[in-house]
Amino acid sequence: MVSMNAQGASPKSLRQHRPFALYWGSRVCSTVALQMQAVAVGWLIYDITRNPLDLGLVGLVQFIPAVLFVLFAGHAADRYDRRIIIRVCQSVSGLAMAALAIGSAFGWLSRDTLLAIVFFTGAARAFEQTALATLLPGIVPVSLLSRATAASASAFQIAVIGGPAVGGLLTAISPVLVFALCCLLYIISSTVISMVTVERNASLRKPVSFAVLFAGFRYIWHNRLILGAISIDLFAVVVGSVYALLPVFARDVFHVDSSGLGILRASPGVGALVAAVLLAHRPPKQHVGRMIFAAVGAYAIAVIIFAMSTSFFLSMGLLAILGFSDMVSVVIRTTLIQLQTTDEVRGRAGAVNSLFVIASNQLGDFRAGLAASWIGTVPAVLVGGVGALMVVAVSRMMFSSMYRIEALETRR
């Protein structure tokens, strides 16, 4: 295995690394805004229509721009300053939140207006997520990359805990407050990311062509380890996602207000944060492949039991288990992709990974909303959990080499 300390003198701790600290702070701000936005938009749409299919449409309109722009997002991340890309995207999101605040204040928000604005934030996120993921290896030494990935994930989970809780509480007071605060957080995040010092910049200067744009897909397709890690997560979450239907559970199953919805949305973040902190201090060193399959299997079981639960507090615990399991899979997969990918194609490979992440979440939301409109909310979640277990079984047969991975290694 290639030594992880080959870069010479470097900070021994992430706490001593100022660029990462700024990156971490920026990500917390932008993710808090995103999570607050998700709670408020979901609650408002279900309040307007009381149709779970419309909750699924929120996921679909965010997925469409991800598909449309993924190739260009990856190429841009490999060609241009990733900090500038992030700043532009966060500025667009900030303007979208300002529009939602004004619309809430003057009462002209409708389902279609909400979906249209969410489309623009989805387009911005397609570029931002790719640039964020590919920026990290350029600001921390390779020796700290595994820990930085987990610590970055912990920043996300802190936001996933705090964002929904605050968003749910403020939505109960006034949606205007939620969207105005989201706008402010995006502005702060954009400012902070501009202060990050990059040690290794994107260097691609090839002209745009189909060969250049599709390089990320080709790279991942020919790497069975990366392909397997991405595929199991993609299909398990597509068939087993529950997040879009949480407004329905909050209103119609547990009979709580938007504050209760915020708590439900925050619960997976609690479990995921615990996992991220554990992995940041004790990175996985053996049985890595088995850990991915076990984590996705635990995710599926948690979804199944959640579907049958009528207890608000039990459901909180199940969502925390779901979040813990998902985070274990995310950290291992993300680290594997970073270590197995060369820098010249990292942006485009990262864009493909971002597309699959967005696809799993947003298409999962759409599937959940569509299924709930056909067979009911509880059966839709139950069937999804069983489907996720089937994904684990099929993936075990198709990607046996990934199951046998013992340790994370750099590409030879």
Image (spheres, rainbow, N blue to C red):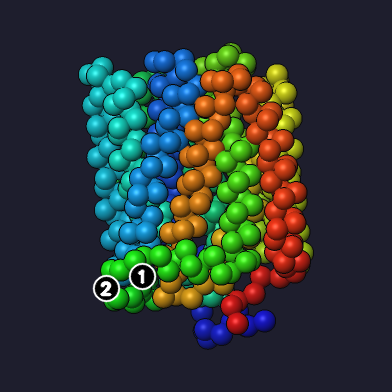
Q: Which mark is residue 207?
A: 2
Who is closer to the viewer here, 239 or 136? 239
| Alpha carbon distance from label 1 to label 2 | 8 Å
Position in image of residue 165 (x %, y %): 51, 31
Q: Quadrant of the N terminus?
A: bottom right
Q: Is residue 101 left or right of residue 321?
A: left
State the residue at coordinates (58%, 49%): 234
State the residue at coordinates (56%, 20%): 374
Q: Which mark is residue 275?
A: none
Residue 166 vs 229, above or below: the answer is above
Who is closer to the viewer here, 345 or 283? 345
In the picture of the structure, the residue carrying the numbered disc 1 is 212
Position in image of residue 370 (x %, y %): 52, 27
Residue 322 vs 341, above or below: the answer is above
Position in image of residue 350 (x %, y %): 46, 62
Q: Quadrant of the C terminus?
A: bottom right
Q: Residues within 10 Å of mark 2 (few under 14, many from 20)?
A: few
State the residue at coordinates (25%, 34%): 98
Inspect the image, locate mark 1, and give the three-letter code of the amino acid beneath it: Val
State the residue at coordinates (72%, 35%): 386
Q: Is residue 1 left or right of residue 44?
A: right
Q: Is residue 387 left or right of residue 146?
A: right
Disc 1 + disc 2, Cβ < 8 Å = yes
Q: Is residue 234 visible?
A: yes
**Element marked by disc 1:** helix
Inspect the image, locate mark 2, and give the three-letter code of the amino acid beneath it: Pro
Residue 188 vs 39, above or below: the answer is below
**Element marked by disc 2:** loop
